[in-house]
């Protein structure tokens, strides 16, 4: 599958087959994709605990909750708890040295001396600020996005959900005090169709992106839009005419109570 088609066909899959287990090697491939994503200073603060529902303790499963659409956690065979390890920032000097030795940072005969004299002291001086929410979350998002595309490439469905009681979750998973839970991701084989009702609505392109200053919409080329439609990245918008019938079928087949929102 080409990248453009993968980006276009990916959906947040909320209805999964609870009886079909996910192979550990497929989860590993997701984690491998997350591991090689870009991260400022090569700190790699993105970490994860993978919970396999068929082998995790009741305490761990009970701790993984979501305030919205919690039925998704009940259905998913696997739940990934993604978190920031803020203590990773403490090792940033070593990570910068690794980048330099790998040829990814600096140039010239004096680059090692300049790293020790200038860059490392600068980052060391703001180390505690770098542990705060911000850059870490942004770069962790890149890793989670790559893991999500890897899951889709393997025929899996995923959905990102905000955690409920993150402190209880942190304790029951045995995470250190330095861990900050980001989000939980359900993983499983889709019970719904690959189209999942069509491509989800998004705000107008011109209202999101600007050129050379705010208020100057980035010009959207009709030719590029047509090209991306042809490549499968831009697809038929939701809802598909059969979507409500599919949702009712899934509600009954998966014994989902209520309206699926809470």
Image (cartoon, rainbow, N blue to C red):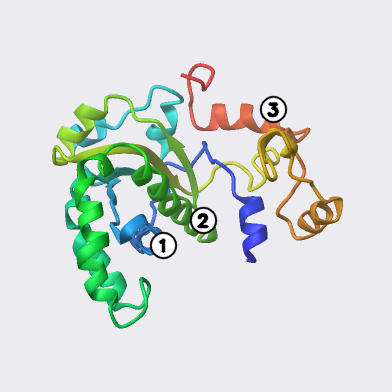
Q: Are marks 2 and 3 in contact (CB under 8 Å)?
A: no
Q: Nearer the viewer, mark 3 or mark 1?
A: 1
Q: Is residue 223 above or below residue 56?
A: below
Q: Are marks 1 and 2 in contact (CB under 8 Å)?
A: yes
What is the spatial separation of the Cα atoms under label 2 and label 3, in whole angstroms?
27 Å
Q: Residue furthest top?
A: 258
What is the spatial separation of the Cα atoms under label 1 and label 2, in whole angstroms?
9 Å
The front one of 110 and 156 is 110
Compared across the picture, whether 261 is left or right of 230 comes to left
Q: Is residue 247 above or below residue 211?
A: above
Q: Earlier in the sequence, mark 3 or mark 1?
A: 1
- Name the residue at 32% across, 77% down: 102
The front one of 250 and 212 is 212
Kindly tell me whether residue 191 is visible in this rendering. yes
- Determine the secondary structure under disc 1: helix
**Residue 244, numbered label:** 3
Compared across the picture, whether 236 is left or right of 149 comes to right
Q: Earlier in the sequence, mark 2 or mark 3?
A: 2
Compared across the picture, whether 239 is left or right of 167 comes to right
- Name the residue at 54% across, 41% down: 13
Residue 161: image location, x then y, percent: 42, 33
Residue identifier under label 1: 33
Query: How many labels were placed on the picture?
Result: 3
Q: Earlier in the sequence, mark 1 or mark 2?
A: 1
Q: The N terminus lies in which quarter of the figure?
A: bottom right
Decide: few, some or many residues near mark 2? Use Cα within 10 Å; few <14, some 14-19, many ≥20. many
Q: Nearer the viewer, mark 2 or mark 3?
A: 2
Residue identifier under label 2: 149
The front one of 15 and 110 is 110
What is the spatial separation of the Cα atoms under label 3 and label 1, in whole angstroms?
35 Å
The picture quadrant where one finds residue 94 is bottom left
Residue 24: image location, x then y, percent: 33, 59
């Amino acid at each position: 599958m080409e990248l453009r088609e993968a980006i276009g066909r990916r959906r947040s899959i909320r209805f999964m087959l609870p009886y079909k287990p996910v192979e550990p090697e497929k989860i590993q491939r997701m984690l491998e994709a997350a591991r090689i994503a870009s991260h400022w200073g090569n700190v790699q603060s993105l970490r994860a605990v993978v919970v396999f529902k068929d082998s995790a303790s009741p305490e761990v499963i009970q701790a993984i909750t979501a305030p919205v659409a919690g039925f998704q956690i009940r259905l998913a065979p696997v739940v990934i708890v993604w978190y920031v390890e803020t203590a990773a920032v403490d090792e940033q000097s070593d990570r910068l040295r690794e980048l330099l030795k790998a040829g990814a940072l600096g140039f010239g005969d004096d680059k090692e001396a300049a790293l020790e004299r200038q860059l490392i002291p600068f980052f060391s001086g703001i180390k505690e600020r770098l542990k705060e929410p911000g850059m870490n979350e942004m770069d962790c998002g890149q890793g989670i996005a790559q893991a999500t595309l890897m899951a889709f490439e393997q025929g899996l469905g995923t959905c990102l959900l905000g955690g409920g009681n993150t402190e209880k979750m942190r304790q029951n998973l045995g995470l250190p005090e330095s861990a900050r839970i980001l989000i939980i991701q359900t993983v499983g084989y889709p019970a719904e169709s690959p189209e999942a009702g069509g491509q989800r609505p998004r705000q107008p392109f011109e209202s999101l992106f600007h050129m050379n200053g705010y208020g100057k919409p980035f010009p959207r080329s009709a030719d590029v839009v047509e090209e991306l439609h042809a490549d499968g990245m831009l697809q038929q918008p939701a809802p598909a005419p059969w979507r409500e019938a599919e949702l009712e079928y899934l509600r009954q087949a998966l014994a989902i109570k209520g309206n699926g929102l809470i």
